[in-house]
Image: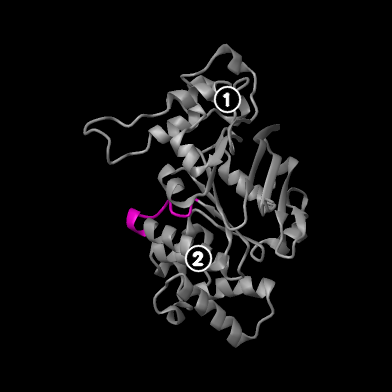
Amino acid sequence: MTKAPILSVDGLRVTFRARGRTVTALRDVGFSLQAGKTLALVGESGSGKSVTSLALLGLLPPNGAVAGGNAFYRSRNGETVDLAGLSARAFRKIRGREIAMIFQEPMSSLNPLFSIGEQIGEMLDLHEDLDAATRRRRIVEMLELVEIPAAASRLSSYPHELSGGMRQRVMIALALVCAPQLLIADEPTTALDVTVQAQILELMRRLQREMGMSILFITHDMGVVAEMADDVAVMYAGAVVEEAGVGELFAAPAHPYTRGLLASIPRPDRPEGERLKAIPGAVPPLFALPRGCAFAPRCSFALPACQRRVLLMEVAARHRAACIRAQEVLADA
């Protein structure tokens, strides 16, 4: 019997009010994340990945709102909570304790006016009642867990005194200090060089094994997806266009957009001098989406029938794509 997922998103819609009009940023987004696994949410900038994460944590800006759908989260006590309908007060009890998030840029996410010890300690103060000695010991243990050298001496350090890699480790410590079940990582290695990126990814994999947590990993880097994910949901223009296990997706992409993303990855076996393949055009603005399939204007497989919207359909076991020519794309892969 298959265990219920820790997070199940279905039909999630998010709108923004700007300049007197309402724009739909997420269109019926759906995916599932199994306990202890990593689901990668992937797509170009503007596809809706970060908006999805903010909606799940109740962090949308004042002009944004969840306009429909559900996001069922299975808490550590077994209770199922719909994140799409929670009040601000209820979210404050969940954020950090049950679900935590690592943001893209630690320098803008960490407060420059407070030491890292104070910032990690604030998370403990919100969710746990600890005496001063236990609180300090927990902070030091967390910094040691994320491999910050001389952790005890770093408590009084400020964010600007640390390197980019160290700041990202502090962000991970801040997110995990209350041992959440679910970690949302929003492009946590984008601002780091390749060597530090590899260290951070390995650190996250190790902490996931040790803590048994689930990860929703948001990225535009398909190389990182191959390294981190168990399952993948590909987003385009505010909708999920393909979802599959990571092996199935890389071996046989069924949506032309996914195929384009994979073709753009630099490979060591690529013939010398061969240019990387780029997807023509750009993601359309959300206030001017084309009729039907939003990817059709950029797609070499497009037909007149693509002017009607296609929902996700099964193309193989545990593999769905929103394309009327998915089987032909598979055959041509």
Main SS, magenta region, reads: loop
The residue carrying pointer 2 sits among few (fewer than 14), some (14 to 19) or many (20 or more) residues within 10 Å by Cα, namely some
Q: Nearer the viewer, residue 150 or 325?
A: 325
User: Element under label 2?
Assistant: helix
Q: Along the polypeptide, which appears first: circle 2 or circle 1?
A: 2
Q: Residue at x 75, y 57 (%)?
A: 88
- Specify the quadrant of the image occupied by residue 147: bottom left
Q: Can see residue 63?
A: no
Residue 181 pos. (x, y %) = 63, 62
Q: Which residue is mark 2?
A: 207
Viewer-side residue, 23 vs 301 = 301
- Looking at the rendered structure, the kind of residue marked 1 is Cys
What is the span of residues highlighted in magenta in the rendered image? 187-196
* 104 in relation to 128, above or below: above
- The x, y position of residue 324, in whole percent, is 58, 21
Task: Tell me: 31 left or right of 150.
Answer: right
Residue 323's disc is 1
Helix, strand or loop under label 1:
loop
Q: Is residue 12 above or below residue 56?
A: above
* Image-based side of 59 in relation to 41, left or right: right
Q: Is 87 on the left or on the right of 19, as rendered? A: right
Q: Which residue is more in the foreground, 92 or 229? A: 229
**Identity of the residue drawn at 65% across and 38% down:** 29
Front residue of 58/9: it is: 9
Seen at 61% across and 17% down, the residue is: 307
> What's under tag 2, amino acid-wise?
Leu
- For the C terminus, the image quarter is top left
Q: Is residue 331 visible?
A: yes
Question: What x and y, as percent, mark residue 289?
Answer: 60, 25
Task: Note whether 107 is above or below 11 in the view shown.
Answer: below
Q: Is residue 189 magenta?
A: yes
